[in-house]
Amino acid sequence: MQEYKLFINGEWVESSTGETFDDYNPTTLELIGKIQRASQDDVQRAADSAEDAFERWSSTPPPYRGKILFQAARMLEERKEELARLMTIEMGKVLDETRGDVQEAIDMTYYAAGEGRRLLGETTPSELPNKFCLTVRRPIGVVGLITPWNFPLAIPSWKIMPALICGNTAVFKPASDTPILAIELVKILTEAGLPKGVLNLVTGDGSTVGGAIIRNRKIRSISFTGSLETGKLVMGEASRDMKRVSLELGGKNPIIVMDDADLNLAVDGILWGAFGTAGQRCTAASRVIAHEKILPLLQEKLIERTKQLKIGNGLDEGTDIGPVINNSQLQKIAKYVEIGKDEGAKLVQGGSIIKPLPGYFFEPTIFTDAASDMKIAQDEIFGPVVSLISAGNLDEAIQIANSVVYGLSSSIYTDSINDAFRAIEKIEAGITYINSSTIGAEIHLPFGGVKSSGNGAREAGTTAIEEFTELKTVYFDYSGKLQKAQIDLAY
Ligand code: UN1
């Protein structure tokens, strides 16, 4: 059994307590690794080492930092298939999707590497003569990066690569369900030439390790992706010493299907959005809001196609849906199905735990006759469960779409340009797709949500640089005399 270590100050080390925890394959329930249970002391050492490395790394020219990331991107590319397989073993999603996850990491790494020759500020004239104004970007310092298990390489890359190119050093805590992929990523960056102390990895449980990162005074900023519940704790704790916080939280993402939509296209999108990654995406489509005229036909087509989905080992080509991540998620999904039935929604497809293999499998599940205020239509379930809700017209559909606390992704299927633009304008979400599903964000565009889906932060795209830099505004006076803004009017 392979034992994996923490990575602190350029060395692979055991936790100070000597404790480990087990990492299981959710498909077969085989033990795949022993992982260090880091202590608060380990987090402190990681933060100390990141702080020590900061001076040198932040003064390294960004194109040189980029060179290391380019090398890491090439290495990720070379190892894509191997990493995808390892990811399916560690977290269960099917190979096609794990390949996509690795590709997302490759794309983000190249994109961030290129930023080494941009990191743009702005220049603007002054209101006074012989004076010049500009902004420059400075790194924040030591940043804490806390990531979930559903995108074991992609989401860490969204955070690590921009953080590093901007000159920050980091303490990184991956999810306890997927530490091995995180460890592989750190190894790749190290082999690519990242100096010691720049990126430190600590594994262990959220409350001890995550908590210690959030409370650590040396860590100036926290970037967290996970549940709303934990996000609130992170924000509360981080406010104590005014850390910057970037939160990407849950979603209850709607697909609106209008009566003029291409229904087969909509069904493709619903299946992909609701059941891809076994519904375990913050962008998953968990509500379908269908125009009442086409709802019966849409439902029929959806059920028929869902019945054809193959559930099993994600390593087998041809499998559509793998297991969910662990037993507590599985039980949570089962509990929500019971809640949905009690609330009076109609279970028309799936609804049960199944055992094609020893792991944590749940049938793709469809509820109809759901009302927008039901718990199954309000809460993030994070499993392969979708609820169909009827709407009489676009306004009603949008009102239902907006009736949840979340606002991450959204989608509308329609042939009407006018309806599409109204949806873009009125749906409360950080992302709106037209005639495609709620999932599949590309790395060079901002990603994030409104309302309780986050705190206004956006990851990826140009906003990735904003997330990981402080802007410094510079006033450069070359007049040789005291000039007073707002007082010495030059006009
Ligand atoms: C997430 O589920 O936390 O758009 C991120 C998508 C992926 C990213 C999802 N590219 O579904």
Image (tube, rainbow, N blue to C red):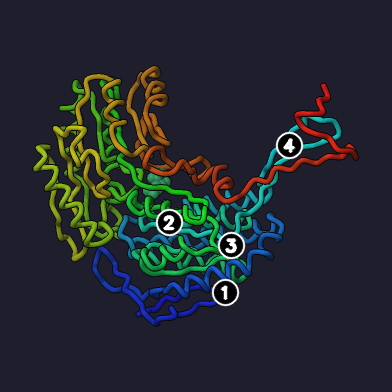
Nearer the observer, disc 4 or disc 1? Answer: 4
Residue at x 46%, y 62% (from the top left corner) = 215
Classed neighbour count for the residue bearing mark 2: other residues with Cα under 10 Å, few (<14), some (14–19), many (≥20): some
Which comes before the other along the chain, label 1 or label 3?
1
Mark 4 vs mark 1, CA separation in Å: 39 Å
Q: Residue 251's image quarter?
A: top left
Above or below, 224 relative to 12: above
Which comes before the other along the chain, label 4 or label 1?
1
Q: Amino acid at mark 1?
A: Gly
Q: Looking at the image, which is closer to me, 140 or 354?
A: 140
Q: Residue 154: which disc?
A: none
Residue 111's spot in the image, x, y percent?
Answer: 57, 49
Q: Where does the N terminus fall, quadrant-wise?
A: bottom left
Q: Is residue 12 left or right of residue 358?
A: right
Classed neighbour count for the residue bearing mark 3: other residues with Cα under 10 Å, few (<14), some (14–19), many (≥20): many
Classed neighbour count for the residue bearing mark 1: other residues with Cα under 10 Å, few (<14), some (14–19), many (≥20): some
Mark 4 vs 1: CB contact within 8 A: no
Nearer the observer, disc 1 or disc 2? Answer: 2
Q: Residue 123: which disc?
A: 4
Residue at image mark 1: 10
